[in-house]
């Protein structure tokens, strides 16, 4: 009985560790230049929840803290978030396009003096989900809640695998198309070289025949 209980506890611990490993959350520090912008990108597939909090920090402790402008764009250039004169903020969206999502920051006043840093708490997928609200709404807790997290993690892995499979198919198709075009161009180039050689040989033969050299 004790061994079975120990195995169950070990399995639960392994499941919790797996959930922690599968959660995608990053804390990013960016040093903003006085002029220009600083951007970060992340490749995200379709139908993924993205949540991010950011805060501006003055490296020389200027008060009030200088403001920045934040802009988030989708892979097709759609603006998902745009905020000016901000010292902190949050953006959240659900992706409907697969590809590289771009987040850019820049100082509103390049002459404000002092270096600025931006701290970004970036979360996607199950890491962006409010599990406390889910637990309160569905009245679950403990192991049942962790199993629900694991179920969501498995679904996220399945979606990632499908996305990677589709990307692999697209890359393979592009590669095959490129190889076909290269082969066609090679054959055309070889044909042109052979035709040019035959024409040159014919011309030289006619030339030597006129000069009665052959």
Image: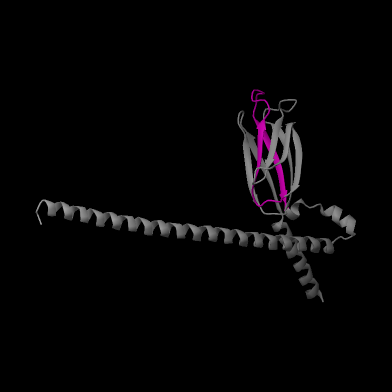
Task: Spot the residue most to the front.
Answer: 210
Any magenta on residue 110?
yes
> Is 180 placed left or right of 200 in the picture?
right
Q: Is residue 55 above or below residue 49?
A: above
**Boundaries of the magenta span:** 95-124
Q: Is residue 171 above or below residue 58?
A: below
Q: Is residue 148 above or below residue 5?
A: above
Task: Spot the residue most to the bottom.
Answer: 1
Percent from the top left, x then y, of residue 78? 68, 43
Q: Residue at x 64, y 46 (%)?
A: 76
Percent from the top left, x then y, of residue 83? 73, 34
Name the quarter where the N terminus is drawn. bottom right
> Is 162 placed left or right of 211 in the picture?
right
| Image quadrant in which you'd find residue 32 | top right
Name the quarter where the C terminus is drawn. bottom left
Give the colour scheme shown.
one colour
| Image quadrant in which you'd find residue 125 | bottom right
| Image quadrant in which you'd find residue 189 | bottom left
Q: Residue at x 73, y 64 (%)?
A: 14
Percent from the top left, x then y, of residue 111? 64, 22
In this figure, what is the number of numbered marks? 0
Decide whether the magenta segment is chiefly helix, strand or loop: strand
Q: Residue at x 76, y 40 (%)?
A: 90
Front residue (pair 55, 45): 45
Percent from the top left, x then y, of residue 57? 71, 33
Any magenta on residue 115?
yes
């Amino acid at each position: 009985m004790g061994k079975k209980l120990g195995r169950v506890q070990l399995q639960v611990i392994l499941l919790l560790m797996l959930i922690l490993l599968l959660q995608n959350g990053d804390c990013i520090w960016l040093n903003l230049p006085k002029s220009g912008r600083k951007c970060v990108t992340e490749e995200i597939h379709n139908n993924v929840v993205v949540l991010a909090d950011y805060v501006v920090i003055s490296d020389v402790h200027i008060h009030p803290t200088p403001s920045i402008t934040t802009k988030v764009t989708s892979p097709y250039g759609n603006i998902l978030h745009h905020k000016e004169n901000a010292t902190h903020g949050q953006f959240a969206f659900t992706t409907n396009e697969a590809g590289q999502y771009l987040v850019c920051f820049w100082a509103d006043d390049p002459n404000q003096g002092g270096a600025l840093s931006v701290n970004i708490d970036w979360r996607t997928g199950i890491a962006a989900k409010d599990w406390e609200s889910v637990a309160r709404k569905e009245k679950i807790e403990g192991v049942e809640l962790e199993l629900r997290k694991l179920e969501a993690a498995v679904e996220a892995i399945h979606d990632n695998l499908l996305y990677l499979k589709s990307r692999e198919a697209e890359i393979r198709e592009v590669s095959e198309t490129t190889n076909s075009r290269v082969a066609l161009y090679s054959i055309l180039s070889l044909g042109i070289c052979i035709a040019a050689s035959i024409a040159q040989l014919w011309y030289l033969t006619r030339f030597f025949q006129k000069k009665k050299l052959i």
